[in-house]
Image (cartoon, grey):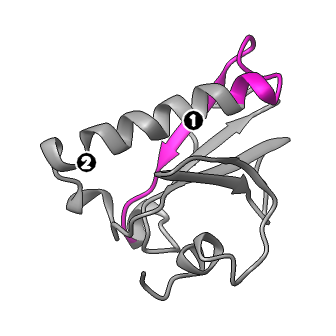
Amino acid sequence: MGNTIFSKIIDKEIPADIVYESDAVLAFRDINPQAPVHILIIPKIEIPTVREIKGEEHSQLLGEMYDAANSIAKDEGISEDGFRLVFNCDDHGGQEVYHIHMHLLGGRQMNWPPG
């Protein structure tokens, strides 16, 4: 595993408020939430950016991330009102940790454009 903060969370070297875990995916509360519910959903394998996602190789993994998002949204009580899922890519896209991660945001009205 690499040296990102997410790798350290996966390896349980750094504590996190984990809300979901499977063999392939881990989800935990963001330490700087931008909504009442702000959870990061990450694969347990390190893929630096969305540009490195390979269709056939990673399609099942991405499906598991979306399944996790739906499950967590239901558990958090935001599935009925709606929520937002976001992937950021590189500096201009707002990516800070180079290990792909999906933001699950909800619990309030999301605005557009996001900023």
Please give the label number shown on residue 58.
2
Q: Residue at (47%, 62%) from the top-left corner?
A: 44
* Residue 77 lies in the magenta stretch: yes
Of the residues under marks 2 and 1, which one precedes in the sequence?
Answer: 2
Q: Give how far across and how far down residue 41 sits, in percent.
A: 57, 50
Q: Which residues are magenta?
A: 73-90
The quarter of the picture where residue 76 lies is top right
Indicate the amino acid at tag 2: His
Q: State which quarter of the image contains the N terminus.
A: bottom left
Tell me: residue 14, above or below residue 64: below
Residue 108 in sight here:
no
For this orientation, the residue located farthest to the front is 23
Residue 106: x and y in percent read 74, 33
Could you tell whether 54 is left or right of 24 in the image?
left
Q: Which mark is residue 111?
A: none
Above or below — where is 110 with respect to 100? above
Query: At 23% from the left edge and 54% from the top edge, which residue is drawn?
Result: 53
SS at badge 2: helix
Question: Under tag 1, what secondary structure?
Answer: helix
Residue 43 in sight from this viewpoint: yes
Counting other residues with Cα less than 10 Å from the Cα at mark 2, is it few (<14), some (14-19), or many (20 or more)? few
Is residue 81 highlighted in magenta?
yes
**What x and y, as percent, mark residue 28?**
71, 55
Give the quadrant of residue 79: top right
- Circle 1 residue: 68
Q: Residue furthest top?
A: 80
